[in-house]
Amino acid sequence: MRSLYLRPPVAGRRARIRVPGDKSISHRAFLFAALASGRTHIIGPNHGLDVLATVRALRALGVNVRRMQLGFSVIGSGFCDPRRVIDCGNSGTTMRLLAGALAGRVDAQLDGDASLRRRPMSRVTTPLALMGARMESRAGYPPLRIFRGRDPLRPIRYKIPVASAQVATALLIAAIGARGPSTFVQTATTRDHTQRLLLAMGAKLRCSGRTLRIWPSQLRPVTKLRVPGDVSAAVYLLCAAAALPGTQLVVRDVGVNPTRTAALEVLRRMGAPVRLVRRRMWTNEPVADLQITGGAALRNVAVPGRLVPNLIDEIPALCALATIARGTLCVRQAAELRVKESDRIETTVRLLRAFGADARALDDGIVVHGGNKLRAPRSVRTSGDHRIGFAAAILAAASHSCITIRDSECMATSFPGFVRIWREAF
């Protein structure tokens, strides 16, 4: 297993950096381009292992996906039955979105690594079965077998029981090929990259609050589909910069979709001076540069439950920063953390305690009491979870220490080039 050594950060530096393309948008860009009729150029997508799993899967399904100088070219022409099991690696997004895209269209089997085999798929397969899709799984877990259907899927009205953009996306792209309009009602507002990109590609879709209604559609290709920087990756750097007095950091060309910026709102509530400048739009997505100056007095807050679905991936990073803030950070209504690449509640608390922080796990969240003097261990483990690795880097910055992160290869799933960018910033 690979180990990653990070030297002690230097406070007071000035840096302007870019982060990799948004992972969520990249998955959707490749998949929707494959469903469109014609050629789409995807510029600046994420090149991490998760997104590359989606690229490999599409190639196995007969889609023409070619790497170009600035990104990829995708020619949408439908799917064919793959000759082998499609390996989704560690990417739950790849498997869930493919389940919706392939439902009723091909005979295929989707599988993944040991971590992915522990992630629930029934939240996708159950409503797809209501639409007439035939699927088999291991008691609701991967591997997942998909069977070609004789007839188009049935339209349905369905209330999605979990706050999951992945589930909503899988159902929307399945419904594009159904024989009538479908309606999906979300229990909470989740990231809306799917809705924005489907509308940009000509889908017949109506969004009214949490209700999504979609009609059978043929997607149009996009000449230049430019992917903004991943705001989750930017949050790791902003948290580290906030802990380093005098540091001035600008993260350029970041996606600031309102359904993804809840972590920035929490950082501001904690007293971190995050600013958004140079706002503009790329393929229906808002983009800006993010600025922060480190060293502000930080105070912990109770995170409102309404924000949790839209900062679920950033909770470990915020918990890491909370260790040096005054007061208590409390996150509730976040039970979804227990079914990520790890039980992220337990692994986050274990990591914080390894640095001497006062933290405890709740059934549905985490409590962090700030203000303790941190002491970095010689090394930590990620438990195969990239978000834990990035939280460890933030804790090392907050304690002004070096750190060795063991089993760090998982960090490349979402943030390729992390070490280079981290060293440029700090």
Image (spheres, rainbow, N blue to C red):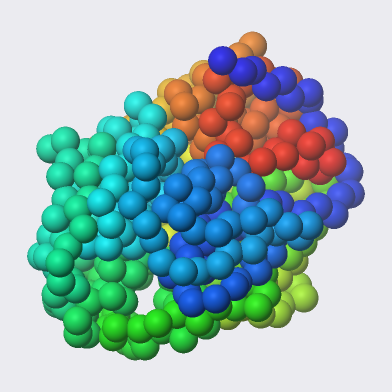
The image shows residue 381, relative to residue 415, as above or below, that is above
The image shows residue 334, relative to residue 30, as above or below, that is above
Residue positioned 47% across, 32% down in the render? 385
Left-right relation of 381 to 247? left
Residue 341 falls in image quadrant: top left
Q: Where is residue 401 in the image (x, y as percent from the top left)?
A: 73, 22
Left-right relation of 74 to 207? right
Residue positioned 74% across, 34% down in the render? 419
Q: Where is residue 106 in the image (x, y as percent from the top left)?
A: 28, 57
Asked if one can make out residue 393 in the rendered structure from this viewpoint, the answer is: yes
Give the farthest residue toward the top: 378
Q: How many labels does the image show?
A: 0
- Viewer-nearest residue: 103 or 142: 103
Quadrant of the image for the N terminus?
top right
Quadrant of the image for the C terminus?
top right
Asked if one can make out residue 356 in the rendered structure from this viewpoint, the answer is: no
Residue positioned 46% across, 69% down in the render? 77
- Viewer-nearest residue: 33 or 401: 33
Residue positioned 85% across, 54% down in the render? 16
Q: Where is residue 208 in the image (x, y as percent from the top left)?
A: 32, 86
Q: Where is residue 7 in the image (x, y as percent from the top left)?
A: 78, 23
Residue 282 falls in image quadrant: bottom right
- Viewer-nearest residue: 169 or 275: 169
